[in-house]
Image (cartoon, helix red, strand yellow):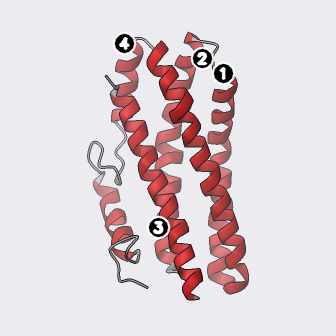
Amino acid sequence: MTHAAVRIIRQEHAALAAMLRSIVMLLDQHRRKGTMPDFATLRAMLFYVDEFPEKRHHPKETELLFPRLRACTPISRDLMDKLDNDHAWGERKIRHVEHALLAFEMLGEPRRLAFEQAMNEYVSFYLEHMAHEEREILPLAERVLSADDWRELDAAFGENRDLFSNHPAPDEVYASLFTRIVNAVPAPIGLGPAL
């Protein structure tokens, strides 16, 4: 039986991976066509990447899941330290991407490549981070944590309301952001008109 917290973490990771990959696909599409992206849509997408994981997802891993694991087993402590460090640096990394986007928007084509490189580096960093959690940390947690640990983790992660995975239901405050992103991103990535 998969615990609710594990299911929620995996759903949130899938939603975030989809958003990150969509940004890269969107940038590739615009580069191939020689067009400028809709900066408001990119800002909305990056806002999600910043807002939900950095402020709601990571703290629960760093403050609840990892300490419980460290208390139960010496296995993977170095990896948890690395993942905690990733969480700590994640906010700085996303600020760098947001700054590169602003430079691209304000200064135009000469800054496209720098933004795309910053975005690609962030996506690679983040996808690798989530893969480590899913391949190593979550299976370890399922092996060593107690029923009491799981009750508390399930309740804590159950409070997360990710608008992209609909778990448990999207916060109303984010619903308009979700709709705006999906409707603005060009098909086939989103529902907007194709480029």
**Residue found 66% across the figure and 41% down from its top:** 86
**Residue found 68% across the figure and 37% down from its top:** 85
Residue type at mark 1 is: Arg
Mark identifier at residue 77: 1
Q: Could you tell me how far apart the alpha carbons at marks 4 and 2 are, in whole angstroms?
A: 16 Å
Residue 12: percent from left, percent from top: 42, 44
Mark identifier at residue 1: none
Lower position in the chain sequence, tag 4 or tag 2: 2
Q: Mark 4, residues whose alpha carbon is within 10 Å: few (<14), some, or many (≥20)?
A: few
Residue type at mark 3 is: Ala
**Residue found 63% across the figure and 53% down from its top:** 124
SS category of the residue bearing label 4: helix
Q: Could you tell me how far apart the alpha carbons at marks 1 and 3 are, in whole angstroms?
A: 35 Å
* Closer to the camera in the image, 118 or 57: 118
Q: Mark 2, residues whose alpha carbon is within 10 Å: few (<14), some, or many (≥20)?
A: some
Mark 1–mark 2 CB contact (< 8 Å)? yes
Residue 33: percent from left, percent from top: 54, 87
Lower position in the chain sequence, tag 1 or tag 4: 1
Residue type at mark 2 is: Arg
Pair 4/3: label in front:
4
Quarter in which the C terminus is drawn: bottom left
Would you say residue 136 is visible in this rendering?
A: yes
Lower position in the chain sequence, tag 1 or tag 3: 3
Residue 139: percent from left, percent from top: 48, 24
Q: Which residue is mark 3?
A: 44
In this picture, is 155 found above or below 87?
A: above
- 148 relative position to 45: left or right: left
Mark 3–mark 2 CB contact (< 8 Å)? no
Q: Which residue is mark 2?
A: 70
Q: Mark 1, residues whose alpha carbon is within 10 Å: few (<14), some, or many (≥20)?
A: some
Residue type at mark 4 is: Ala
Q: Which residue is mark 4?
A: 147
